[in-house]
Amino acid sequence: MSALKKKIVLITGASRGFGFQVAMGLAEKNLHLIITSRTVGALESLSDKIQASGSTVTIAPLDLSKEKDFQIVARSIYERFGTIDILIHSASSAIPMAPIETIQKNELINLFQNTFITQQVIKMIDPLLKKDPSALALFIQDTNEYRSNKFLGLYNANRVASREIIEAYAAERKRLGPTILTFNPKPMPTKIRSVLFPGENKDKLSTCKTEAKKMVEFISSFL
């Protein structure tokens, strides 16, 4: 397969945890991976591993909350590749536990950054996905098992808001494509979870590698 015919896969939040393991799993599929995160050094290290596994790679250091920077990256992808075949949105920020009555207005706005980023990813990447009706966009979502837990009001509100945005996007694109899906991995010992549940027994959790393998197997049907 020539480099020009390789499917283009964009992975956000690829520098660590679940996103990192997904990138490593897909690296064996002879794709071209575009990997993003805020950490340049981690992206460079991952890039070396991807190339050693047989795929080609482009690193794109990016803070997804910075709209102008995101526009530049999206434009660069368009100019170089013209399209994205698969989007995997794995990036997310930790939201600490807090009693609802203690949250200040400015904190509330800042802590809804995950929802804002979900919409920004759709806004920036949708034009690239539309180039191919068979394209796939996968959004990593948490399960609803903690919806009623105390001190998790902001976290759950973010997740619900993001899910509603994704579901609306899926409905809007259902007839013409691309395919919009969510993937709900089992709880893993990620940085975000350690903020939500400090002191939790990690032996009872799945692993990022195990959950990433499941998703890579699912994605393989689209390759």
Image (cartoon, rainbow, N blue to C red):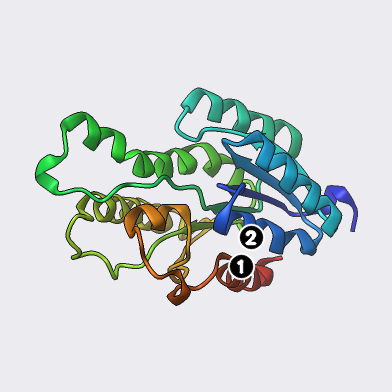
Q: Is residue 18 left or right of residue 152?
A: right
Disc 2: which residue: 21
Q: Position of residue 12 (x, y in %)?
A: 57, 46
Q: Position of residue 46 (x, y in %)?
A: 72, 48
Q: Callout 2: few (<14), some (14-19), or many (20+) C-alpha neighbours within 10 Å?
A: many
Task: Tell which circle, 1 or 2, labels the residue nearer the N-terminal end.
Answer: 2
Q: Nearer the viewer, residue 190 or 184?
A: 190
| Secondary structure found at label 2 | helix
User: Disc 1 residue type?
Assistant: Lys
Q: Quadrant of residue 81?
A: top right
- Mark 1 vs 2: CB contact within 8 A: yes
Residue 124 visible to an observer of this rendering: yes
Q: Position of residue 2 (x, y in %)?
A: 90, 53
Q: Nearer the viewer, residue 200 or 174?
A: 200
Q: Is residue 28 left or right of residue 66?
A: right
Q: Residue furthest left?
A: 101
Residue shown at 45% from the left, 47% from the top = 92
Residue 141 numbered tag: none
Quadrant where the image shows the N terminus: bottom right
The image shows residue 90, relative to residue 102, as above or below, that is below
Q: Nearer the viewer, residue 192 or 51?
A: 192
Q: Callout 1: few (<14), some (14-19), or many (20+) C-alpha neighbours within 10 Å?
A: some
Q: Quadrant of residue 47?
A: top right
Q: Residue furthest top?
A: 68
Residue 209 numbered tag: 1
Residue shown at 54% from the left, 69% from the top = 207
| Secondary structure found at label 1 | helix
The image shows residue 44, relative to residue 201, as above or below, that is above
